[in-house]
Amino acid sequence: MNAPRRLLNELYPLGFFGLLFTNTLFNQWVVYSHAPPGTGAGPRGVGAVMLLGYVLQGLANPLLGLAGDRLRATFGSRRPLSLVAAPLMLGVFSVLWGETAPVVLVLAYCLLFTTVMQPYLALLPSIAGTPKLRLRMTLTGSFFGLAASGAALLAGPLLVQRFGFSALATAGASVFVVTLLVPLLLVREAPVNEADVRGKGSPADFFEVLRVPAVRRFVLGSLLLTATLMALVVSGPYVAGAVLHQPQSATAVLNGFLVVGMLVSVALLGKLGKRFEPLTLMRAGAKVGVAVLALLGTVTFLEPSMATWAACALGFFVLGYLALSVLALPSLVVARLSDEDGRGREGVFFGLSGVATGFGNAVGAFAASSLLPLARDAGDATGLQATIAVSAVLAIASVLVLPRRVGVST
């Protein structure tokens, strides 16, 4: 790779800031904006649309993987897909928060987000040619992504409380343009060696890879872990009222602890990643999730106090490791699988990972949006307790399902 291209490709990790800033705002606030506490069955409507949207994300990921494996454009095979979808996604996100915005826009956003995200993730092997460089870019991208999630988690409650939901559109669109569209226009894919890719991109490739038991367990375990995190993210704005009996500014404080936990986890994984396999660290994240859910579940039965605040803050801080396990580690696992496979089928492996993400988001979002309405008012923790219980079941299942080792022949 020549020096100018290598320099431009250093912008690649920055793209995750724009993607995850907008998506964190979407994931945490779309249910709340369409169905505030005490609206009874309201959230089930947007929850059903989110379920459909995330299911379609899961189904679209393999198709996008195949398209990226087969596409041959002047400026790349995966980047064109993201370039076409990014402006459309930006437009939908910008109008999603209007008072009269139809809920079907949630569905459009889900589909467009995965059309940008999946090819962008699959760029990694052609952007970074060595495992060492991939680890550095993945951790750098994770840092940007977690910083973006943190900024969204901190700013979201304050923007909503002071300016209303329309402020989310302005903030998200501005960040998206500067930190995603610019890198997307400038990064360069490595040239494709046509001799190595003849006949690739067949749907049969997915079934061939899925015939490996350990790969199936990895996909299912990743799905369950993603569902756990999604359910908790959707539940976040409800903790302030149901547990702490505080306004939404308290959500910003708790989210601050989550952000610090994620940033600490980046440094921790930078060290642990040199000694342990990414899959081992994912399993540890699932176990951490089980422990934290037990803590948060207990807190929901207590009266608001300093001890309750401290327990919630600790729980959100430690959840940072679970968040990083879902956001960063699967990409390292599938990049290593793609290397081991050696047949130029990156889209297949990243597509399968995208299936786990899409369906995991569907399960988590639908479970939370269906259970949270059980609360009679903003101070009732019944819906939150039910959501935490289901999340704990999902986390325990992911611990049991995730394999200790995964390869294309295991």
Image (spheres, helix red, strand yellow):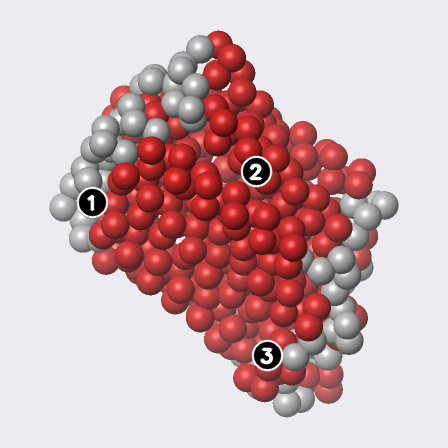
Seen in the picture, residue 154 relative to 279 is either above or below; the reply is above
Residue with the most extreme left position: 100
Amino acid at dot 2:
Leu
Most foreground residue, 99 or 180? 99
**Disc 1 vs disc 3: which is toward the camera?**
1
> Circle 2 is placed at which residue position?
146
Residue 228 image position (x, y, % from top left)? 51, 47
Residue 197 image position (x, y, % from top left)? 68, 83
Disc 1 secondary structure class: helix
Q: Disc 2 to disc 3, how far (Cα)?
A: 30 Å
Left or right: 373 in relation to 316: left
Q: Residues within 10 Å of mark 3 (few under 14, many from 20)?
A: some
Name the residue rendered at 79%, 45% in the picture: 273
Q: Disc 1 to disc 2, how far (Cα)?
A: 31 Å
Amino acid at dot 3:
Phe
Most foreground residue, 404 or 323? 404
**Disc 1 vs disc 2: which is toward the camera?**
1
Left or right: 241 in relation to 36: right
The part of the image, by quadrant, that contains residue 171 is top left
Name the residue rendered at 43%, 55% in the picture: 363
Residue 206 image position (x, y, % from top left)? 59, 79
Q: Is disc 1 in contact with disc 2, using a CB cutoff of under 8 Å?
A: no
Most foreground residue, 62 or 91? 62
> Circle 3 is placed at which residue position?
206
Residue 251 image position (x, y, % from top left)? 41, 25
Q: Which mark is residue 42?
A: 1
Disc 2 secondary structure class: helix
Point out the tag, 2 or 3, that comes first from the N-terminus.
2
